[in-house]
Amino acid sequence: MTRQKETDMAAKQDKTDDIAALNFEQAFSRLAAAVERLQGGNLSLEQAIAEFESGQALAERCSKLLDEAELKVSQVAVSATMISESTATYTLDLFSLHTSSDDSSDEDDESEAADKDDRFKDIPF
């Protein structure tokens, strides 16, 4: 491998490392600038190829960051749904406990009323 190729490969690796450190807004801004330079048409073939390669790496970085953001949003949505469902279940359980205790007190009231009626059954009217 020639010294020039080694230098070029090291420079590409540095650019790749730099791109990997960018947040979405930074990567997208650089991608937009690369597109503008390519559309300007004032680049040599070598410059255009280098700009295109850089743009590809930036587009991949943006895509990766968007995928990660989408995954986070999905996880939050699932978590929120699970919390909502568990809260609804808990509320229904509390309601069931409350209504079942109300039902038993109604039964007790009916039983007491029947007992009172039985007290007076032997009295002739």
Image (cartoon, rainbow, N blue to C red):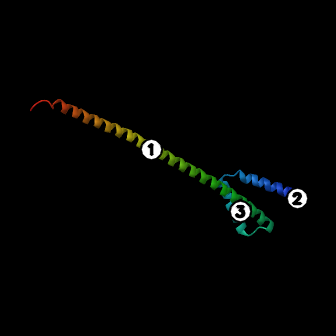
Q: Is residue 4 left or right of residue 95?
A: right
**Which residue is labeled 1 in the image?**
89
**Residue lying at 80% horizontally and 66% vertically, measured from the top left:** 46
**The furthest residue to the bottom:** 41
Q: Which amino acid type corresponds to the residue marked 1 in the rendered image?
A: Thr
Which of 37/74 is in front?
Answer: 74
The numbered mark, 2 or 3, whose residue comes first in the sequence reads: 2
**Which residue is labeled 2 in the image?**
4
The numbered mark, 3 or 1, whose residue comes first in the sequence reads: 3
**Residue lying at 18% horizontally and 33% vertically, measured from the top left:** 117
Q: Residues within 10 Å of mark 1 (few under 14, many from 20)?
A: few
Quadrant of the image containing the N terminus: bottom right
**Residue lying at 75% horizontally and 52% vertically, measured from the top left:** 17
Determine the secondary structure under disc 2: helix
CB under 8 Å between callouts 2 and 1?
no
Determine the secondary structure under disc 3: helix
Residue 61 x, y percent position in the rendering: 69, 56
Dot in front, 2 or 3: 2
Dot in front, 3 or 1: 1
Label 2, label 1: how far apart the Cα atoms are: 68 Å
**Which residue is labeled 3 in the image?**
34
Q: Residues within 10 Å of mark 3 (few under 14, many from 20)?
A: many
Q: Is residue 15 left or right of residue 65?
A: right
Image quarter of residue 100: top left
Which of 63/42 is in front?
Answer: 63
Image quarter of residue 90: top left
Q: Which amino acid type corresponds to the residue marked 3 in the rendered image?
A: Ala
